[in-house]
Amino acid sequence: MKKIRHWTRSATRLAALGVACLALVAGCGPRKTALVTYHDANMDFGVVQTVAVMPFVNLTNEKRAAGRVRDMFMTVLQATGTVYVLPPGEVGRGISRLRIESPEEPTPDEVIAMATNVGADAIITGTVLEYGTVRSGTSTANIISVSVEMMEAQTGKIVWSAASTKGGVSASDRLFGGGGQPMNGVTEAAIKELMNSLFSN
């Protein structure tokens, strides 16, 4: 079970990393937007009313990237009014009580225990793969690539995952010297795309 779980997570992360690499390699082209998504066809997402968002993995050089993206993700998710997002302090206390060593990558058993402990119907984890500035010639712009996964409380298995990349240097940026969108703007755009993926099921 653990091997399957790790393989699934690795496959999701590799897919997201591939999306990020495509966006970076194509930095000389138009501003990039990409989405990779998966839904468990057997999952009734209507029963998910309370979620706990775990700390995100940070694979970037920006030390605060994971915290910033997680905070905005939680805010945007709460603002949809579709689910209740547990406060980060409550999530942190649950992690401490259960002594989860790697809350960014919980095992299925830890997901089940965490969901029971904090009263969540699902647990969400995330990975920030790219966050910051990219350059194409003399132009620069902000880019973000983030992947997220939702595990349901009863089995700890992944029922939804998605990866989004936003930003990059556009043709107009190169021609007219624009600097692309602000970091908050591309981050919000990526997260909203993830939300659309989640709630389109």
Image: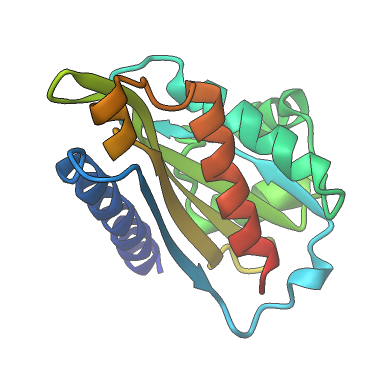
Residue 167 as seen in the image, left or right of residue 59: right
Visible residue check, residue 60? no
Quadrant for residue 180, please give it: top left
Determine whether, in the image, residue 186 is placed left or right of residue 124.
Answer: left
Q: Is residue 19 visible?
A: yes
Q: Quadrant of the N terminus?
A: bottom left
Q: Quadrant of residue 112?
A: bottom right
**Residue 128's x, y, as percent?**
40, 36
Q: Work out whether 119 lies above or below 200.
A: above
- x, y percent for residue 87: 78, 30
Q: Nearer the viewer, residue 58 or 185?
A: 185
Measured as percent of width and height from the top left, residue 165 is found at: 39, 46
Residue in the image at 47% along x and 66% along y: 37
Q: Nearer the viewer, residue 162 or 151?
A: 162
Q: Residue at x 49, y 43 (%)?
A: 126
Position of 40 relative to 10 (above/below) = below
State the residue at coordinates (71%, 27%): 88
Q: How is the image coloured?
A: rainbow
Residue at the image point whose x is 57% and y is 52% from the top? 193
Quadrant position of the C terminus in the picture: bottom right
Number of labelled discs? 0
Place of residue 25 in the rendered image (x, y in percent of width and height, measured from the top left): 15, 43
User: Relative to 48, does residue 111 appear above or below in the rendering?
Assistant: above
Residue closest to the far front = 176
Residue extending farthest to the top is 63
